[in-house]
Amino acid sequence: MKPNLICSSAILLSIFCVAVSMVNPPLGEIPILPEATFDYVPAEAPQYVNNSQAVRQVDNDAATLGRVIFYDKRLSKNGKISCASCHKQKHSFADDKQFSLGIDNIPSFRNAPNLNDLGWSETSSLFWDLGESKLHEMVLVPILNTDEMAGEFENVIDKLENTSFYPDLFYEAFGNSTISETKIGTALAHFINAMSTFNSKYDQVLQGYEEFSAAELSGKKLFNDNCRFCHSMNSFSSTNHVTVRNNALDSNFDADRGMGTWAGVENDGFFRSPSLRNVALSAPYMHDGRFATLEKVMQFYNEELQDTPNSFAINPPYYQQGGLNESGYHFTVTETSDIIAFLHTLTDETFTTDEKFSNPFPNQTVRTETLPNLENIKAYPIPSNNHVTIYYPTQSAEIILYDFHGRVIKRMESHGGEEVIYKNDLAPGMYGISILSENKQGNLKIIFN
Ligand code: HEC
Ligand code: HEC
């Protein structure tokens, strides 16, 4: 039995909410959940999915709680951000913005990746730089990150305890209604592990229900011959240390060293690709969202590969497998569009429209408002050895300096159109600057050597 405070239909909700609208919590902050839980237990991975990893166990009550938490803005300090602000269902839980905006409109350093198929693919590491490995622990990171949700667990737990419905949801999921950090992480992991895309055309064809077109079939063969080493077939992910590569995107890693940030320079420029399942829905692409379309991605693979000691362009066996030479694969126009047609067969819109993964809060819309752009802001020099001067076009501004993990290092009230940031104790690397002035905002990245 679901707790009766959670309205099971719109009619019930309106009766209940009329009753409570004069007290806390206000209308719209109560999730509407089905009487019987949705079935989150994912289908077994089809047999042709060649992986040693079974689909991770998912419990319906824990995933139901995870869904509510995922969409709940109470988790953020200012009550405006939830996981879904950056991970949007219709984009397979990726962000369609290049960089996601967190608290105070501070942008993330990397593009928010899709979350589909993490529950069964060979995921031994998470994040673009493989810096996290355990989903149930990792999901707590954004709640605390100052640029993301900036919550503090004591406050978060307090807020959840003070609702009419969370204690019951925790009870259903865990057998008692105590709310803890660990349980929040576990519930989110159950919800995310339930996200799979086995209804794609690719899967339908492999299960014998549909057929590939000639173009898709040709694209599949080209993909198999040229891309599979890194984007393993079936999960289409590059999720462990063996398949993660420097895919020759850059010749200079100052802006983002990827795995090199924690594993040393020989891993500079190593990133993992999120699953290519649903890739057609998760633009923009790459860790920094630099490519807006799959056509742009293919143009890069065709002719813009950068040669560096770490890059696969000069590293056998990848070099020897396809028709790759130093600058790219040089696929013909038809081959290129065949590969893109094949990538489209990996789309599963039943997942991105499935109610069980949707927002249960009737009045909570995903935040879209951003502050208007502050034009003509500059920083000089980049990179810098000891100090950077920030120039902005208004008399006064608030300047926020934050690190790669989004932790705010310093907030400064600044006057006179410029401000100097000294390196002092800062470690070498990339930092973010947000300039807030007269309800406008500008963002910059600076680098200290
Ligand atoms: C402000 C935007 C933002 C918010 C809010 C946010 N995320 Fe993320 N998320 C990101 C970005 C950006 C990354 C990539 C980080 C990286 O690789 O360095 C990411 C990565 C992830 C990953 C790893 C995916 C992978 O394939 O490696 C998971 C899982 C995830 N987020 C879940 C969550 C959950 C759960 C919440 C809510 C508790 C949340 N996120 C809130 C932006 C956000
Ligand atoms: C040497 C390994 C390697 C090869 C070969 C390779 N990729 Fe990638 N791919 C990656 C890595 C690593 C990333 C993520 C790079 C980053 O963001 O910095 C990536 C990213 C992508 C993305 C963007 C994913 C996203 O969600 O942002 C697409 C699309 C893609 N690759 C398609 C292909 C295709 C098509 C081929 C074959 C023509 C191919 N890749 C060959 C390693 C490889």
Image (cartoon, helix red, strand yellow):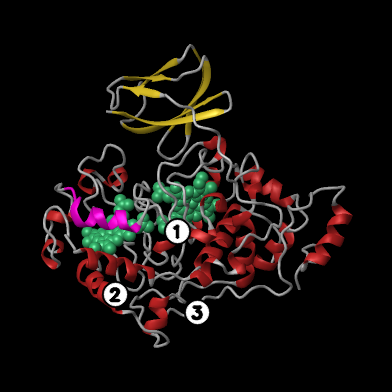
Q: Quadrant of residue 272?
A: bottom left
**The disc label shown at residue 43, or none:** 3
Label 2 within 8 A of ligand 2 by Cβ: no
Q: CA distance from mark 1 to mark 3?
A: 20 Å
Type of amino acid at the residue the image marks with label 3: Ala
Residue 154: give x, y in percent of width and height: 64, 44
- At 60% across and 61% down in the image, what residue appears? 66
Q: What stretch of residues is rendered in magenta?
A: 294-306
Q: Is residue 89 left or right of residue 74?
A: left
Q: Contact (CB < 8 A) between labels 2 and 1?
A: no
Residue indicated by mark 2: 215
Q: Which residue is at the far bottom?
A: 208
- Considering the whole magenta stretch, tell me its main secondary structure: helix
The earlier-in-sequence mark between 1 and 3 is 3
Residue indicated by mark 1: 114
Q: CA distance from mark 2 to mark 3?
A: 29 Å
Q: Is residue 442 left or right of residue 369?
A: left
Q: Is residue 388 above or below residue 180?
A: above
The earlier-in-sequence mark between 2 and 3 is 3
Q: In this orientation, does residue 140 appear?
A: no
Type of amino acid at the residue the image marks with label 2: Ala
Q: Is residue 431 left or right of residue 264?
A: right
Q: Quadrant of residue 176?
A: bottom right
